[in-house]
Image: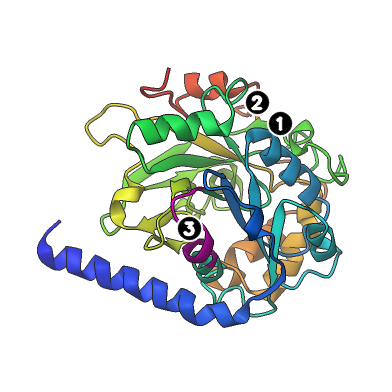
Amino acid sequence: MGLISSYRMRLRRRYWRIRALRRRRQLTVVRDRTGRIRRDAILSFTTMRNERPRIPYFLDYYRRLGVDHFFVVDNGSEDGSLEYLMAQEDVSVWTTRASYSAASYGVDWLNWLQRQHAHRHWCLTVDVDEFLVYPFCDTRPLRALTDWLDASSIRSFGAMLLDMYPKGPIGAQPYTEGQDPFEIATWFDSGNYVHERNSLYGNLWIQGGVRARTFFADDPWRAPALNKVPLVKWHRDFVYVSSTHALLPRGLNLTYDASGGEKTTGVLMHAKFLSLFVDRAVEESKRAEHFRAGDEYKVYAEGLERDANLWCKWSERYINWRQLEILGLISKGNWA
């Protein structure tokens, strides 16, 4: 990258820091337990709204994986989510009713909290329906991964979003609060993915999966991006610029080996397509608070009914991380 491009990237990073500084006034702290955070704690950052049925399993999953403290921005929940979160001893909670889209889909809020609280911590930034799977996750806790990344001088860890779905009508198996969503959503698309390098931020832009196949079959280039950089050894000057798809400085996005080798990577198993999502898609299409004024959710609302079946004869049933490695969806890289 030339001097002019580097300067522009620094300006762009400053712009995102200023956005976060301005949006901080939209946040009201309702439970601040950050005084309990150890210097070596692994932190999680999430923005959510009306996710009460999903929260118990989300917290349990990441507690078992090794997250020490959760930062949550509640964006005006009305289903008891806020009250539940406030009662959790390892969760610090902020609330806001400000526009999710105007805060760059929550990026500004989380950038501010990470600048204030995450410096020199490993941070996992995920949605409440995203579950990190990485090589050896069945036998090695998250700290084993972060310790290895530290020892290897690696500051960020990439993970492709892997959409999971049930076999049969999406509404046939109602999701119950606290349930493991992958007891229901056990299937995924294994091979219909495309990627290209983003010239601006240097990340791989990945598309495909069941959403490209089912909802965006006529225009797959409109399908959602599946590339994520959810796990980062944070510095107060870092910023996310597009959900967890890209960060600045640009080097954090190089979670792949451009020379043809392999870097250690994971997936975020995405439990979006449960029975809960049918009504949620209609609601979010009307709120228009998501990307492109909720256009993606309008597509879901139009194409998704309770008897919709996302399964096809090429669908793969999830077994474990080793299966994903064989399929080329994750890699051990040099971590053995």
x, y percent for residue 257:
29, 34
Residue 332 drawn above or below residue 71: above
Instruction: Report which quarter residue 84 is drawn in.
Output: bottom right
> Dots 3 and 1: beta carbons under 8 Å?
no
Q: Marks 1 and 2, how far apart in space?
A: 6 Å
> Dots 1 and 2: beta carbons under 8 Å?
yes
Quadrant into which the N terminus falls: bottom left
Nearer the observer, 288 or 268? 268
Residue marked by disc 1: 186
Identified by mark 3, the residue type is: Arg
Q: Marks 2 and 3, how far apart in space?
A: 26 Å
Q: Marks 3 and 1, how far apart in space?
A: 25 Å
Q: Which mark is residue 224?
A: none
Lower position in the chain sequence, tag 3 or tag 1:
1
The answer to whether residue 203 of the structure is visible from this angle is: no
State left or right for residue 93 relative to residue 146: right
Residue marked by disc 2: 318
**Tag 3: Cα neighbours inside 10 Å, few (<14), some, or many (≥20)?**
some
Identified by mark 2, the residue type is: Tyr
What's the magenta region?
113-122
Q: Which mark is residue 222?
A: 3
Q: Identify which residue is drawn at 45% across, 32% down.
A: 147
318 in the magenta segment: no
